[in-house]
Image (cartoon, rainbow, N blue to C red):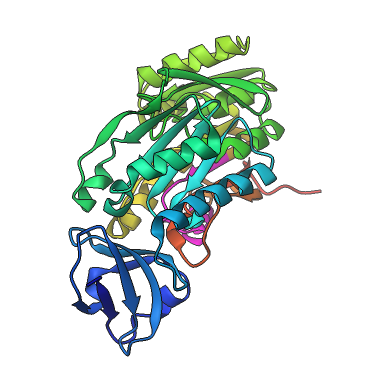
Amino acid sequence: MPYAIYLKKGEQRRIEDGHPWVYANEVARIEGKDKNGSLATVYTYDGKYIGRGFINHASKILVRIFIRDDRTDCDNIIAERIRLAHRRRTELGYDNAYRAIFGEADGLPALIVDKYADYLSVQILSLGMYLRKASIVDELVKEFAPKGIYERSDVSVRQKEGLPEEKGLLYGEVPEWAEIEENGLKMAVNIVNGQKTGYFLDQKENRLALRRYAKGEVLDCFCNSGGFALNAAVVAERVTAVDASEFALSNVRRNAELNGLNNIDAVCADVFQLLREYRKQNRQFDCIVLDPPAFTKTANETQDALRGYSDINMLAMKLIRDGGYLVTCSCSHYVSNAAFEKMLAETARRSGKQAQCLEVRSQAPDHPTLLSADETHYLKCFVLRISDKQETI
């Protein structure tokens, strides 16, 4: 008999509003018996139907709902959602490199698929999707006709699902490096060993927007493979790209060479330490980009994360020439837009600077947000003009 999950009194509102996750501590009782990873039906405490999703007793997220009607043919539903996600991207004009499937936001919880030219890179982050890997791959082959599909499920979050970290070829042939096109630039993406699925596609439109502000000397911090640095180098006089990973910097140099850009200096250093050293040297820049990794992965560490963001942004603000630009980002969904903006305002005040907000940006549209699930809205990108004193007319 399939699982029937009954919520505690009062726990249904968030889930009825469209959030797909049912936490184990929200459940009053479980009836029926089936295999772990099977389809379970979720009800309110008094028996009102809410939806269906895959169950995992090993996870704090007991059920990941993706069906809201009376259907139970999950394989067909997954196939339909894959086709729908693809169509929605092509309708927006995405073609060469983009996020093809964005998990919960596309009604496919815990499934990530990125397209890099002729290849797909896949992350499967839940037991339910893991058990259906073969049928998912079959549908991706039918829909995208890729030359190859590579799995990048080598992420620690899988441990929370009781799953091992895995990576490897799933279909066809996949080279270690694939060449994509982004904003008119050629970019070499390491599908096999690059960060996440190979490259950070969510910032592509913010990287293009940087060209408006990348004047004179630009400093790109936490540059990874150079997405911001290369876009800046198209219009700036000189770009310094900084990362603590020599592997990432070798990719920056490779990408600069691919595009014939000889105005990028790749520096291997701890960003915090380097900015302090630049401060001692009285170095200044016309534009600084801060795109650090997430400073927190849990709600309990939010305040510590905000202190870290304040520290790095204060260092940057003090290195920007009067009237220059700061493009500053956070990729942690635990840090809200409002909290990040408040931190920036307080940091500017303590730095003795005037900060004028020119743009508030987010992740690219191929990473849609589900308004009922804050977790899908994670990327914040503020563009600030930094001045030494209050400007007057």
* Depth check, front residue: 331 or 343: 331
Q: Is residue 343 left or right of residue 130?
A: right
Identified at 53% across, 42% down, the residue is 100
Residue 273 visible from this viewpoint: yes
Residue 281, image x and y in percent?
46, 21
Q: Is residue 144 left or right of residue 127?
A: right
Residue 108, image x and y in percent?
44, 54
Identified at 61% across, 17% down, the residue is 238
Identified at 27% across, 47% down, the residue is 157
Furthest-bottom residue in view? Answer: 46
Q: Is residue 334 magenta?
A: yes
Q: How many marks?
A: 0
Note whether 376 is above or below 289 in the view shown. below
Identified at 25% across, 46% down, the residue is 158
Q: Is residue 119 left or right of residue 206?
A: left
* Depth check, front residue: 132 or 211: 132
Specify the segment rendered in magenta.
Answer: 327-345
Residue 355 visible from this viewpoint: no
Note whether 325 is above or below 66 in the view shown. above
Q: Is residue 337 magenta?
A: yes
Residue 97, image x and y in percent?
57, 32
| Image quadrant containing the N terminus | bottom left
